[in-house]
Amino acid sequence: MRTKYGRYSGMATLVFTAAAIVFFLLPSSLLQAGDDASTILATIGSEKITMAEFKQELNSLPPQYRQMAKDPAIQKEFLDTLVTRNLIYQEGIRRKIQDSPAVKKQLEMFRKKLVVAALLDQEVNRKIKEVSDEELKNYYDGHLKEFQQPKQVKARHILLKDEKQAEDVRQKLLKGGDFTALAKEFSTCPSKARGGDLGFFTRDQMVKEFSDVAFSLKPNEISPVVKTQFGYHIIVVDEIKEGRQQTFDEVKDKLKEKMRAERKNKYFNDYIAGLKKQMQVKTYPDLLDQK
């Protein structure tokens, strides 16, 4: 759907995806709460769209679309999209589309997904103990090496297939030639479009022969011709970031996400293991080879 707000078209499309059927399957008690349930934003025949339903729809969108929806104009168009979808839904019900075998099959698939999601939320997500600041600090103090930021360099290079040509280009650089222009003219690496710019990288992100030279250079120093499995390189380093220990405050949020994810994974695995003990589960993976 195209609107005068071009950036919104992707969000409008999301509302009409098959996943949007979930909205109509959820009990109203799960969607409505407090005053939002009594605030009516639109009526379509006998149907209503409440503030609670509107917020539920917004919260189901990916983060980038939720951010866009802070714009009042986008909110109005989003409401129009919900109205349009409801119109189509009601017409489908009137024509008994929901009774077709294909739709019933899809609804059953969504029903299973909803049951699974609701049960996991009840038995796993809600039972996860939040990671305390003390736990975070203890982990940080006991794993300092994990939070060491390695040395990085920001470099450019020119890659050629022929060693002699590489040396000729290097001589042009030594005589004051413009690195960016020469990279665009001669380099065979896709980075030529950026003047050979590789951005920042750590030693282990490049092949050894390349890194050994790049990490030995001073800023603006032109390297000798370097041979690697990719060809012959001429390297210049623009900036150096020395390695350092990241502080606890710098890593706290990401560490909390990591530890919570690990805790959630353990809860999940333990829960599934318990279910498997209660039920007989058999799989026949060998049959997959017969396809």
Image: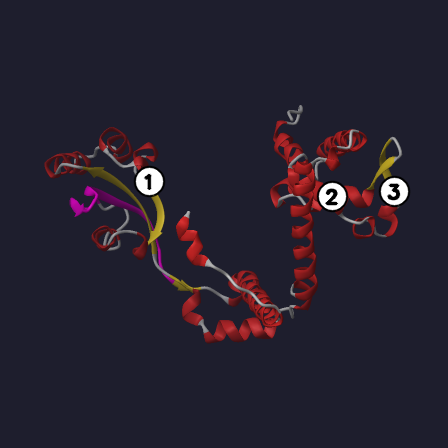
Residue 3 quadrant:
top right
Q: Which residues are magenta?
A: 222-243
Residue type (three-letter) at the residue carrying disc 2:
Phe
Name the residue beneath numbered marker 3: 39
Residue type (three-letter) at the residue carrying disc 1:
Asp
- Give the left or right position of residue 227, taking residue 56 as reference: left
Tell me: residue 118, above or below residue 165: below
Q: Secondary structure at mark 1?
A: strand
Total count of labels: 3
- In magenta stretch: residue 219: no
Identify which residue, 91 or 61, lies in the foreground.
91
Name the residue beneath numbered marker 2: 23
Residue 140 at x, y = what percent? 50, 71
Residue 278 at x, y = what percent? 62, 71
Residue 208 at x, y = what percent? 23, 55
Residue 121 quadrant:
bottom right
